[in-house]
Image (tube, helix red, strand yellow):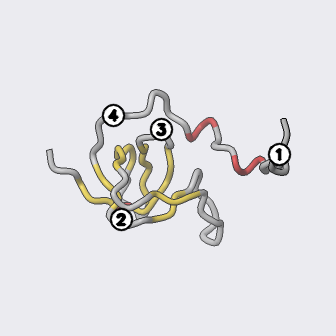
Amino acid sequence: MENVIRPNVVVLPESAQVPERNRIAPAPNQFTHEVAAAQPFYFREGKPDEPAAGELAAGAKVVLMVHDGGELCRVVDARGLYVLTAFAGLRRLQG
């Protein structure tokens, strides 16, 4: 084909993949909480200075899976991501 500009090929690092243990299929379609303001999430508990794996957007619906009273909890979002995030940043859905 003429006049087609192909982008450069980029190989993403292994860290760009979602670990198998952090995926739930099928993803939930009923939710218990929403994220009050954008906040980071982590795939696993780590060091406090470890960078976040991503961010849950404000208004994202999640299912609260595990909360033992601490600062962090485990949630599943609509994409099926099973992650750790701050419990204080969640708002319970009415219903």
Residue linked to disc 3:
80
Side of 69 relative to 14 (left or right)? left
**Could you tell me if the residues under marks 4 and 3 are in contact, i.e. CB atoms within 8 Å?**
no
Q: Secondary structure at mark 3?
A: loop
Quarter of the rendering occupied by the C terminus: top left
Residue linked to disc 2:
89
Q: Position of residue 29 (x, y in %)?
A: 33, 34
Q: Nearer the viewer, mark 1 or mark 4?
A: 1
Q: Nearer the viewer, mark 3 or mark 2?
A: 3
Q: Position of residue 93 (x, y in %)?
A: 21, 51
**Could you tell me if the residues under marks 4 and 2 are in contact, i.e. CB atoms within 8 Å?**
no
Q: Earlier in the sequence, mark 4 or mark 3?
A: 4
Q: Gap in Å between the C-alphas at discs 4 and 2?
A: 21 Å
Q: Nearer the viewer, mark 4 or mark 2?
A: 4
**Could you tell me if the residues under marks 1 and 3 are in contact, i.e. CB atoms within 8 Å?**
no
Residue linked to disc 4:
29
| Residue at the image point whose x is 84% and y is 51% from the top | 8
Task: Identify which amino acid the numbered label 2 is placed on.
Answer: Gly
| Residue at the image point whose x is 51% and y is 60% from the top | 55
Circle 1 packing at 10 Å, graded few (<14), some (14-19), many (20+), is: few
